[in-house]
Image (cartoon, rainbow, N blue to C red):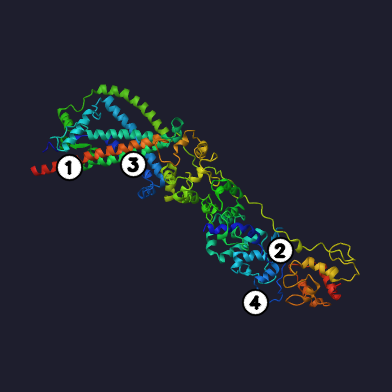
Amino acid sequence: MTRSLAGLTLAILGLVFASSAWADSALPAASPAPAPAAAAAVIDNETCLGCHAAPGQTKTLPSGEPIYISIDPEVFTASIHGREGLQCIGCHAGHDTFPHPAVTAQTRREYNLDRYTVCADCHADKYEASLDSVHQKALAGGNQEAAICTDCHGPHSNVDLDAEPRVAIPQTCEKCHSAIYQAYRESVHGSALTEENPDVPTCIDCHGVHDVHGPSNSPFHLFSPTICLECHADPELMAKYGLSTEIRETYVADFHGTTVLLFEKLAPDQETNKPVCIDCHGVHDILAPNDPNSRVMQENLLNTCQRCHPDATVNFPAAWLGHYAPDPIHTPLVYYVGLFYQILIPVVIGGMAFFVATDLVRTILNRRREARHG
Amino acid sequence: MAETTRRYIRFALPDRVEHILLLASFTTLAVTGLVQKFAEAGISQSIIAVLGGIEGTRTIHHIAAVILLLESIYHLGAVAYKVLVRRSRLDMLPGLGDIRKGWQALLYNLGLRADRPQEGRYNFAEKAEYWAVVWGTVVMAITGFMMWNPISTTRFLPGQVVPAAKAAHGFEAILAVLAILVWHLYHVHLKHFNRSMFTGKMTEKEMIEEHPLELADIKAGVAVRPVDLLVLKRRRRVFFPIYAIVAVVLLVGVYAFVSYEQTAITTLPEPIDVPVFVPLTPTPLPTRPPTATPAPQPTAAPTSTGGPPAAPTAGTALTWDADIGPLLASQCGACHGSFGGLDLSTYAGALAGGVSGPAVVAGDPGASILVLRQQEGGHPGQLSPEDLALVVEWIEAGAPEN
């Protein structure tokens, strides 16, 4: 699934073409005779391309924005929709008559927003999923720039996603999230993303595809460790990079991780300010922990701690054992306290249990003897 | 028989109230603490859910800890009063004798000794438990302070102390709970149910069995040291003010314990990631290829002065080549060119028309579909009335090509 969506790159073109089936265009289909029923039967793609194939045609919307109404027959024919034999009027319903229905949209964005729901006719599952996305929430909140189907998938130019390079995924998101993209490209993940390296995550591995999640809603933040663990708890994958897979155990054993675990289990919709992976390691700009600029690098750790613990001083960061189980060399105090109790508890409790056992036997024997001798 | 049913006062009411407080705070601390230590266990999560989630569980743990601290401060005063004011015997003080008695009791249990050791007011098992509680409370208070105030702790101590305190706190809890379950449960509940901590009294039979030396002292009248009332009053006058000061200091300590530092912010930290919506400069729309853009109106028409397109000089006959062809190429050519149903780029194409019929019928504007369509209005490529008038004039004039 992840890889199958790799083909978003052509969406750049698609954004342009999305609006290309311009209604009320200057292009009369050559059927002025008012015979809509008969016309509908013969409105095939060739009819539409009869006018719309001419390159460089634009119309001006009331907002003054130009809208491109040309279709490159070669691009369309090569697209998935073209190869599948989709008909123009399948999506552009009502355009089988001329003049085409009047357009009420004032701007190009409005035009696209009016039309993209037609994708649901064939891609109902994807469309339904997208209704839960941050993009749809932003859209519902009045942000017209929020991405819709056609912003990522060019309807006249979409190609086989499986055949598309994986590097194209972040490039698609870059169109709107360029600052995040820049941070990502320099991160340990983004800088390693090449076609030869399928190991590192792209945007959609963490954020999902159609039901794109954002970091601002609590469940995403709370459950984000699960996303990291998908790779970082995989011994085979981590062995390639010499990374520890014990990050979950060490995190959950700590105060922060315990809290987050319990919130996940018991209050998944509630906000907690206890840090998850990304709060210390960074999100899109995440770096290897031995990178001098890493937020979890020893020299930078105090700064990172102070984001939540503003009064923390220089000794404080060492209270976090850094995803390592206590050992006698790095954390002797913690290690030997544990060892002390691991010896003390069996000795004390064992001694008590032994005495109690002998006392119990003696008490029972005594009571029997008393009973006998009445 | 009457002798053995006689009951002796063992614990006064304040002692029993202390025990209730200890019992309640210890149990609460044990439950709310262990579920945090073993947070991954299903049973822990069920308990935490009942207690109002992890935040609620921690709050309850903290309240119980404060109750235990307050009870400890009271206990300190009560013991000090008994020792310093009443000058009672230090019955609870452990000694080598207790180790010996423990050993003797073991030998007796194993059948290697004829009788069990004779115990006084507090037997070795009780002393062991009492001092275990003292030890445990001190360890838990110190390590608990460190966990509650990690920033203050690491101002003076290495950071590693905090996880070490956490480890000790958790292990000590296990030790305490197991000791209660093994030692306390057996000695005062299973072996025989010792109600004296709740009723305050013990039967003579129980006394003979567990505290024969104390019973002997009671019978001899030496168990309680007599104190002169005046002496007692004088001692109290000294003791209470001093204890009041100590208690206030300790209470301030408890307050500090609870409120010493604000460990973490209570809000979400400021996000430090980059802004979310930073769109790239949109790709400009493809411009109309030059071929599809009609060249500036040809000024080839000899009568044209290069003014507005197709502005014919009055008196000059309109022709396709000079006037109408360029006009239609400019206004209609984008669609009605070499593609599509109607080709208006050539004279022949205009006469031939599209599927509806000829666009231009020479001499008859009323039969020319081009004119009809334009007169209807609303055509995407709508000619201006002046341009349309020129076309009509040209058709009426027989639509000459040149």
Can you tell which quarter of the image residue A359 is in?
A: top left
What is the three-letter code of the residue carrying label 1?
A: Val
Measured in 3D between alpha carbons, the distance from the residue under mark 1 to the one under mark 2, in whole angstroms, is: 101 Å
Both on one chain, marks 3 and 4? Answer: no
User: Callout 2: 10 Å neighbours few (<14), some, many (20+)?
Assistant: many
B26 displayed left or right of B370: left
Residue A37 is marked as 4
- Quadrant location of the N terminus of chain B? top left
- Quadrant location of the C terminus of chain B? bottom right
What is the three-letter code of the residue carrying label 3?
A: Ala
Measured in 3D between alpha carbons, the distance from the residue under mark 3 to the one under mark 4, in whole angstroms, is: 82 Å
Q: Earlier in the sequence, mark 1 or mark 2?
A: 2
- On the image, the x and y values in percent for residue A83 come to 60, 67
Residue B335 or B311: which is nearer the viewer?
B335
Label 3: state its secondary structure. helix
- On the image, the x and y values in percent for residue B325 come to 82, 69
Q: Earlier in the sequence, mark 1 or mark 4?
A: 4
Label 2: state its secondary structure. loop
Residue B12 or B368: which is nearer the viewer?
B368
- Residue B381, visible in the rendered structure: yes
B374 displayed left or right of B272: right
Mark in the foreground, 1 or 3: 1
Residue A55 is marked as 2
Q: Are marks 4 and 2 in contact (CB under 8 Å)?
A: no
Q: Is residue B312 above or below residue A218?
A: below
Q: Which residue is mark 1?
A: A361
- On the image, the x and y values in percent for residue A29 come to 70, 71
Measured in 3D between alpha carbons, the distance from the residue under mark 1 to the one under mark 4, in whole angstroms, is: 102 Å
What is the three-letter code of the residue carrying label 4?
A: Ala
Q: Tell me which residue sits at (52%, 36%) in the image.
A: A299
Q: Earlier in the sequence, mark 4 or mark 2?
A: 4
